[in-house]
Amino acid sequence: MQTAEQGTLGQLNAIRLEVYRSLLSAIAEEMGAALRRSAYSPNIKERRDYSCAICDGQANPVALGDHMPVHLGAMPQSVEAAVRAHRLAEGDVVILNDPFHGGTHLPDLTAVRGVWLDTGGPVAYVASRAHHADIGGMAPGSMPLSREIFQEGLRVPPVLLARSGVIQPDIWNMLLANVRTPVEREGDLQAQLAALDVGARRLRELAQRDGAANMLSAFAGLAAYADRLVRAVIERIPDGEYRADDVMDDDGAGGEAIGIVTTVEVKGQEMRVDFSGSSPQCPGNINAVAAITESAVRYVLRCVSETLLGTPLPAGGGAMSAVTIVAPLGTIVNAKPPAAVAAGNVETSQRIVDVLFRALVPALPDLMPACSSGTMNNLTLGGIDPQSDQPFAYYETLAGGMGAGPNADGLSGVHTHMTNSLNTPIEALEHAIPVRVRHYSLRRGTGGTGKQRGGDGLRRDIELLTAARMCILAERRRFAPCGAGGGQSGALGESWVRRAGDWIGLGGKVDLDLDAGDVISIRTPGGGGWGNAE
């Protein structure tokens, strides 16, 4: 029998845990704000293509800012890789991007730093990840139509960028010597280090104010709470085996209709997500590493948690001890080196989410949404800026239509699922590189029809003011985003270029050398509709 005092103490403990959850999330968000405000590139300042995280002394996630969902599972793996590779001293910073050792794809550089209090080893780790607009490789922007990872840029295993707070000039200079835009890269790297400073300082302040023991107890409590929530979510999904599959348009290297298959088995409070039957890894760059697949599973569970419990999972789901992920090595969802992986992070991650949601439709038919646009519509440009006579390299993603849900239309012109970035403002784009935006609008009517209508895609036409190399990595040019509950599919995306006054249709994955005056037109897919139209 519980006494009144015990009940009060239990309530206070729960309240205290929620306070710590908010405090730690706020620290991760502040880290992100410091990174964004200090960065040089539009990709980070404007699109907000970054993430920040706090992990405990065992590298388990404690708090992640509401930044990029594709980083949910990958950030802790990067911290684990850094800790395995180095016995960090105070002020040491490890940097890495190797997709086969804790990274996702090469443009995503992750910096990791330990947090010390009084004695002993680090009690926590802070991490910042940013997508750099160029990391070398065979094409500006480092998102080429590659066939092996060596073509995609500089591959960095976990190395010490700083020792005892002092940047190591050999590593620093090596990084900057292998990129096309060293000034911009240096600014963005410094911004990542500033984010780590903010995180470490705030954690020390929290420990001094509230006591180190209380803070560390909150770390453990939040991890346990997240695991309990995961089990509570799974328990609310009817027991059964649910299967779905979908395909990628192509791999950019001649392979087409590459399949992703998942079987979700729910039994009580446990879930098994099995990707057996998915296509083998392919010659093109749409291969995803295991961290990407885990991130997609975490993201879907977080969405289902919001729907079934009305609350998100702390830190993306804690240790996820109730979930078993089977991703056979050597497949499109768990590639092994030297596979090309540049688009696995941005495109295949989206399709994995689509497949997982579709698999859960029979279990939760009145809750699962229609497919969203299913692509990040990646565009890279690079050349020589005629005003400065210096190289430029630019990267952005373009939003599409959100899939409709059972109770609402999908949003239009918005980044969905594994990307939480923004569209680059016209002013920022034209200021950063020698281009002019000639058209920018929603593609009205591209969302799928239904009881609830899918969101519309958008169109952006960019005129080059100088010769440049262009690369497009996009999906849903052959297979449309499907509706749900009887709703219709969204419209396919399109890619065009105007040369000498003629419009030429392009595939979803293409690289071209363009001249001044040429116009690139990216027209993104709409989202699927939900339910039969009345």
Image: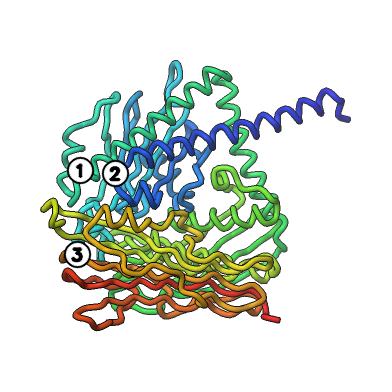
Q: Which residue is located at x 37 percent, y 69 percent?
A: 474
**Kind of residue at badge 2:** Tyr
229 or 187, nearer to the observer = 187
| Residue found at x 86% / y 25% | 4
Q: Nearer the viewer, residue 241 or 497?
A: 497
Identity of the amino acid at label 1?
Val
Instruction: Residue at 46% x, 70% y: name it.
Output: 442
Of 319 and 420, nearer the camera is 420
Residue carrying label 2: 40
Where is residue 142? Give x, y as percent: 25, 58
Instruction: Please state which amino acid type lies under the numbered disc 3.
Output: Leu
Going from N to C along the chain, the mark reached first, 3 or 1, is: 1
Place of residue 365 in the rendered image (x, y in percent of width and height, measured from the top left): 69, 70
Contact flag, marks 2 and 1 (Cβ < 8 Å): yes
Residue 167 in sight from this viewpoint:
yes
The vertical placement of 44 against 93, above or below, is below
Q: Secondary structure at mark 3?
A: loop
Residue 65 appears at what percent x and percent y? 49, 42
Q: Does label 2 or label 1 sit earlier along the sequence?
A: 2
Q: Mark yes or no: residue 280 visible.
A: no
450 to 43, vertically: above or below: below
Dot 1 alpha-carbon crowd within 10 angstroms: few under 14, some 14 to 19, many 20 or more: few
Q: Can you tell which quarter of the image residue 200 is in?
A: top left
Which residue in the protein does label 1 denote? 183
Report, in whole angstroms, how far the alpha carbon at label 2 lies from the one at label 1. Answer: 9 Å
